[in-house]
Image (cartoon, rainbow, N blue to C red):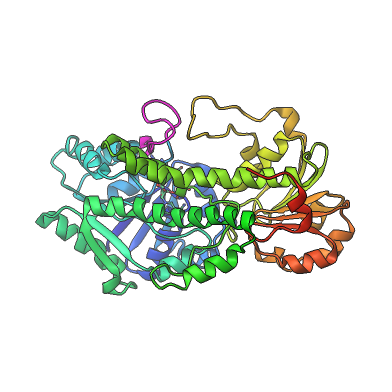
Amino acid sequence: MVKICCIGAGYVGGPTMAVIAFKCPAIEVAVVDISVARIAAWNSDQLPIYEPGLEDIVTQCRGKNLFFSTEVEKHVSEADIIFVSVNTPTKTRGLGAGKAADLTYWESAARMIADVSKNDKIVVEKSTVPVKTAEAIEKILTHNSNGIKYQILSNPEFLAEGTAIQDLFNPDRVLIGGRETPGGQKAIQTLKEVYAHWVPEDRIICTNLWSAELSKLAANAFLAQRISSVNAMSALCEATGADVTQVSHAVGKDMRVGSKFLNASVGFGGSCFQKDILSLVYICECNGLKEVANYWKQVIQVNDYQKNRFVNRVVSSMFNTVSGKKIAILGFAFKKDTGDTRETPAIDVCKGLLGDNANLSIYDPQVTEDQIRKDLSMRKFDWDNPIHLQPMSPTVMKQLNVVWDAYAATKDAHGLCLLTEWDEFKTLDFKKIYDNMQKPAFVFDGRNIIDEQKLREIGFIVYSIGKPLDGWLKDMPAVA
Ligand code: NAI
C-alpha cells in the first residue's frame, strides 16, 4: 500500500487529501498538523472548515484510509509521498516585509522531514511558493540526507474555496513539475498515477519545476487582474451612466476574453490573491524587473481603491457622516459558501465605517462572532507600509455588534451593506427590512446580487457597484 502523508491540515491539506483517500481506497492517507485543535476538529463532527460536500467524504473515509493526526514525525517517517501544504503568508517584518512569502513554516517542515526520514521520499510542494523554492528545499534535504534520496515535485493546488470538492473531483488541470532527470521523471510518474485514479490523463500537465511553481502565481495574478479590471471599469461606469453588468456581459461574449470572473464587486479577498501577487511582485523586483512588478502591483492597488471607494460612497451618501448611525453588514466571509475571512473585503469596509464612528451590526451565516471580533481587532496588514500597523482600539470595538439573523442586523439601521453574495440574501423579505429601518433607508450592494429596481420601488435608496446612480446619490459629493 502506498502511504501518503500531508503536512498541514488546512483549507488545502484537508480537502485535497480527503479526495485522494476517497478516490484511491488502496492508498493510506495521513493528514498531520501541529495544531492540536485543528486535528481534533477534523476528527470530530464539527470539521474545522466549511466546504460543501466535504463532510460526507471525510465521514466515508475517516478511520479507513484517511487519518488526521498530530503525530507528525511518525507519519512523515512512514510515508512514501509527503505533501507539504503549510501556510506561506506574506512576511510582515524583515527583508521583503509586506511582499515576500514567509517560508518559515515550509523550511521547518523540510528540516523535520530530513530529521525523521529513514527511506527515500517524494516531497511534493502543495503550498503556493515563490518560484525556485524547490531548489532551497532540495538543498535543505540533501545536506541533511544521511544517504536518503529525495525527489522534489511541485504540484500547486488550484481549488477555489466554496467549490473545493467539486474542483478536486473535476479539475481543469492537475499540474506536476519535477526535475528533468530520470529520478525526477519517475517521481512525476508516481504522483501522476495517484491522480490518474480519477483525473483524465490529458488534464494532467507535467512540466519542469520552475514552470509549475510560477504557473500557480501566474494563475492567481491573472484571476485577480480580471477582477481589478472589471472593478476599475465599475468606477468609470458610475461616472458615465454605463452599467457594469451590461459592459462585462458584452466584453465577456468575446471568446478570447470569456465570461467568467467578470463580476464587479467591493473587491477580491481570500488568503491567496493578494499574498501571491505580492510574492510575484517581490520576485520581479529581485530579478530587476521593476516595470513588471509595478504592473502587477496595480492589481492590488485597484482592489484597495475599490474597498475605499465603497466606504466613501456609504459615508458620502448618508450626508457625509455615519457617526452614531447603525449600519447593518450582511456577509463577512470573503465569498459565499465558505466561512473563511482571510483578507475579506469586509474587514477593510468595516474598519473604514468604524473609523467614521458608525455602529455596526454584522451577520454572516458561517462566520462566528469570535472570528469577526478577532479580524476587526487585529492590526491591519498594510502591504504598502508593513511597519506602521495599528490595532483597533477597545472603544471602537464597542461600536460592534454581531447577530445571527439578517433581520436583527437591519432592525433600526440607517443603512445596509451587502458584502458577501450568500444565496440567502437574495431571498430576504426586503419590504419587512425596509419597514424596520430608519428613513431614508439605504442599501449598498457590494456584490450586485439584489434587484435594485425592486428595492427602489419599496422605497430604498440603492447603490449597486458600477450601476447607474439614482438621483439621490448623484446629488451627493463625488467619490474619489
Ligand atoms: P492553512 O493556514 O489553512 O493551513 C496550513 C496548516 O499548516 C495550518 O493548520 C498549520 O497549523 C499547519 N502547519 C504549519 N506549519 C506546520 C508544520 N511545521 N507541521 C505541521 N503543520 C504545520 O492554509 P491553507 O489555506 O490550507 O493554505 C496552504 C497553502 O496552500 C498556502 O501556501 C496557500 O497559498 C496554498 N493554497 C491555498 C488555497 C486556498 O484556497 N486556501 C488554494 C490553493 C493554494
Q: Is residue 23 left or right of residue 45?
A: left
Q: Residue 232 location in percent, x, y?
A: 53, 52
Magenta stretch: give its range: 91-105
The residue under the point 21% across, 44% down is 118
Magenta-drawn stretch, dominant element (helix, strand or loop): loop
Q: Residue 271 location in percent, x, y?
A: 49, 47
Q: Is residue 436 above or below residue 8?
A: below
Q: Is residue 399 highlighted in magenta?
A: no
- Quadrant (top left, top right, bottom left, bottom right) of the N terminus: bottom left
Q: Quadrant of residue 326?
A: top right
Q: Is residue 110 above or below residue 427?
A: above
User: Can the viewer see residue 373 in this picture?
Assistant: no
The residue under the point 56% across, 44% down is 305
Q: Residue 340 location in percent, x, y?
A: 56, 51
Label total for image: 0
Front-most of residues 365 and 464: 464
Front-most of residues 117 and 404: 404
The residue under the point 27% across, 61% down is 2
Q: Residue 55 location in percent, x, y?
A: 54, 64
Q: Is residue 188 above or below residue 286?
A: below
The residue under the point 77% across, 40% down is 320
* Residue at the extreme front of the image, as rendered: 240
Q: Is residue 101 highlighted in magenta?
A: yes
- Quadrant (top left, top right, bottom left, bottom right) of the C terminus: top right
User: Can the viewer see residue 415 in this picture?
Assistant: yes
